[in-house]
Image: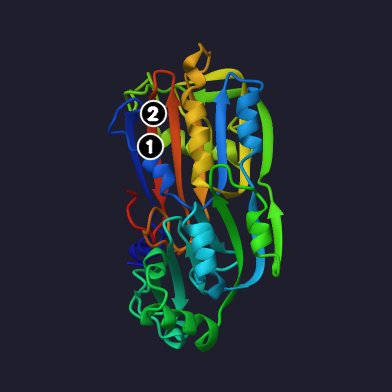
Amino acid sequence: MATLRRLREAPRHLLVCEKSNFGNHKSRHRHLVQTHYYNYRVSFLIPECGILSEELKNLVMNAGPYYFVNNLPLHELITPEFISTFIKKGSCYALTYNTNIDEDNTVALLPNGKLILSLDKDTYEETGLQGHPSQFSGRKIMKFIVSIDLMELSLNLDSKKYERISWSFKEKKPLKFDFLLAWHKTGSEESTMMSYFSKYQIQEHQPKVALSTLRDLQCPVLQSSELEGTPEVSCRALELFDWLGAVFSNVDLNNEPNNFISTYCCPEPSTVVAKAYLCTITGFILPEKICLLLEHLCHYFDEPKLAPWVTLSVQGFADSPVSWEKNEHGFRKGGEHLYNFVIFNNQDYWLQMAVGANDHCPP
């Protein structure tokens, strides 16, 4: 009984794997990237590569900017000026910073103009807004979700609904947060957001980039048509997923008997590549930037390459209120929501999507 109880208490994880081809008109790759809104780390691995092309390097170095605004009143995100300047003229992203989704009040502004609030019970009741209990509250409801469609509100700024929400945020229950903000609009000037929030403490940031060359890396052998692998011929998608985690974490894969830190080793069959290029970008990274990076990696094999495949991995913010689209996200014991593309030289791809216990099944 004790063993069963421990198994029930262990956090569950869900990994969904699918395969397709970038040339397939039914391929979902672009939609799934565009609707995973809050990304803090992007990594790609290119076997048999020692240096990045100038075009790819420029994409990596131009993954920003994003902004940090200290102690920003929530009502600033629902003003007519903010809606007309940022929401209606581009894709605006906002996420509360340094808040814990399972303990604190958190807020996210989606690029479609939906404002999502995850509020504790007391705050929810004090705001007087309409919402619903969190799906991950358990028997005792401690968190509530409020969704406000700012595009709909902007159609009638004299409505009682807009007046009630504005009064709630300004007077009834004024809320302030530290926010990460980013705005995507083709051809826009980067200083727009800096000037708009100039009366607050705002800082512009660029994502951090780490580049490294891995020597004599043992890599799994993969076949694009075989997600489940073939014994002694190719590895399974799940084995690759575990291996990538070890590579990104800089784990020693030698499995030496005197290594007491890790006994993990590369799955078989495998092959040793002389060098592999690993790039990791960390910050507040927009889906639009990731789409550009994925598109460039899709064309990596336009010219003959030694590498049979490359990977692109994206990790979401553990404490964001949503994972994909409007799917509610919780932390539980990990808060993970991530996806990984394996891009093959024939334009086939594998897509792996993983979430933790307090999450919906990936779309």
Image x and y of residue 224, in percent = 36, 23
Q: Amino acid at mark 2?
A: Tyr
Q: Specify the label residue 29 is tagged with.
A: 1
What is the C-alpha distance between the residues marked 1 and 2? 9 Å
Question: Is 338 drawn above or below residue 218 in the view shown?
Answer: below
Is residue 341 in view?
yes
Q: Residue at x 68, y 47 (%)?
A: 206
Q: Could you tell me which residue is drawn at 45 percent across and 58 percent down?
A: 110
Quadrant in the picture for the N terminus: bottom left
Q: Decide which of 285, 72 is in the foreground and name it.
A: 72
* Residue identifier under label 2: 349
Residue type for callout 1: His
Disc 1 crowd rating (10 Å Cα; few below 14, some 14-19, many 20+) is: some
Answer above or below: position of 191 versus 116: above
Q: Can you tell which of label 1 and label 2 is closer to the viewer? A: 1
Task: Determine the secondary structure under disc 1.
Answer: helix
- In the rendered structure, which disc, 1 or 2, sits on the residue that comes first in sequence? 1
In the image, 212: left or right of 141? Answer: right
